[in-house]
Amino acid sequence: MGNARPTVTMTVDGHAVEGEPTGLPVEDPALARPFAHAPRCTPGLLARAVRSCNTAFPAWADLPGSTRQEYLLACGDVLSPYTEELALLLTREQGKPLRDARAEVRRAVDWFRHTAELVLPVESFTDDQGSHVTLSRAPHGVVAAVSPSNFPVILSVCKVAPALLAGNTVVLKPSPETPLTVLRMGELLREVLPAGVLNVISGDGSLGAALTASPGVGMISFTGSPATGRAIARQAAETFTPVVLELGGNDPAIVLPGTDIAAVAGPLFHAALVNNGQFCAAVKRVYVPRGLREQLLDALGGLASSAVVGPGLTAGTELGPLVSRAQRDSVASMVEEAVAAGARVTARGKCPEGEGHFYPPTVVTDLPEGSRLEVEEQFGPVIPVIAYDEVAQAVERANATPYGLGASVWGAGEELTTTADALRCGTVWLNTHGELRHDAPFGGVGCSGTGVEYGYWGLLEYTRITVRNVSPRTA
């Protein structure tokens, strides 16, 4: 892939468009240098994309739900043969191992199919005076969907599929760090969707702000940082535009007294290092009884030391690079700051030589209470292990952050459920962590956002309730 022109095109009103001539450089994080350019959307193209969605909306919303289900199935069918092409492109721009990229694309194909199985409810009742009330669901109109860099394909589809099924049209903007695979997906989907129903554009953060501020947008679905989420929420409040905001997490895992460390160390390690730690629902900190801490540190340290870190296209790679130099530097600074305050690094893996955005899998303990590595989301391959003396102390520290996305408790007996009930978050897993399902809602509290995604409950977010009240009296 060269740098002279965009390798993929944007999709606006069913047509391929390239945008500004300069384009948007896209890095290969394993090499730390651009390997391609994505198109850069102009203000005029953005206006055209939103206008196209508004033009297409009435006819799309008027289709029977069963017809929109067929379109979603067609979306999955058209993507499936391109799994390998999309996965290769995803690995090059995001850095994840190729096997993980393949799994993400396959999951996106399945997500279209699972979403197509959902049906919007129609409820009705008749009161004792004979009035008949019907409650149904109507689409919002144009959905502005903004997806992140860690799982750009599946997290785009998780927005697009339910929005389309509900009768909305969509303008989709991927992260400027990982736009290529989503743009290529848009090229494929425009072969099966009516013109204007799905528009896919790319650009930097200013484009996202312009999109979510567009007066033609009826709903915003965003996955990203709390800072950007706050800005969107303030902006949306001016017009009371509905929003779904998934803003990340700082998920704790609490290991209960008496737990078999040999049995849980491996699952904890892998739950922390999913996508090299770049996962909103990864384990971000582990609380363990003081008497079990050294055993857990030894087990996690062995796994960190043996993990294979390298380019995602290299066979045998288990952990790829972080998506950007800025993300790598952020992780490094949080660890360095914790160590300067008294924390100690007990294990550090190996990274390949070169300029890539690699950071070794790292285990840290003795964190001073309130350090950034405990209370903020590091989004990298670092596992803070924090000792506690009483379970109540672990729960208090687990809850003492602005986030509230997920958490997990590891152990057995009644204390497993009582501890889970005390955690302030959207999802609590017992003896596992981060298992997201297409048929269960996912969302958080506090700085983790508002609203839910996935399944029937996620579909409802893309609708508004409409009430029809028919009086028994004649005019």
Image (spheres, helix red, strand yellow):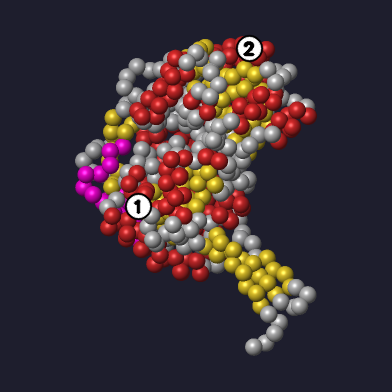
Name the foreground residue: 323 vs 238. 238
Gap in angstroms between the C-alphas marked 2 and 1: 51 Å
Q: Position of residue 9 (x, y in %)?
A: 31, 49
Where residue 138 sits, quadrant-wise, is bottom right
Q: Is residue 293 left or right of residue 108?
A: right
Q: Position of residue 213 (x, y in %)?
A: 38, 55
Q: Tell me, yes or no, if residue 390 can be seen here.
A: yes
Residue 43, placed above or below residue 267: below
Name the foreground residue: 114 vs 273. 273
Q: Secondary structure at mark 1?
A: helix
Q: Tell me, yes or no, if residue 106 can be seen here.
A: no
Q: Residues within 10 Å of mark 2 (few under 14, many from 20)?
A: some
Report the span colored magenta: 8-26
- The residue identified by callout 2 is 295
Q: Residue at x 50, y 46 (%)?
A: 245
Where residue 425 sits, quadrant-wise, is top right
Q: Secondary structure at mark 2?
A: helix
The kind of residue tagged 1 is Ala
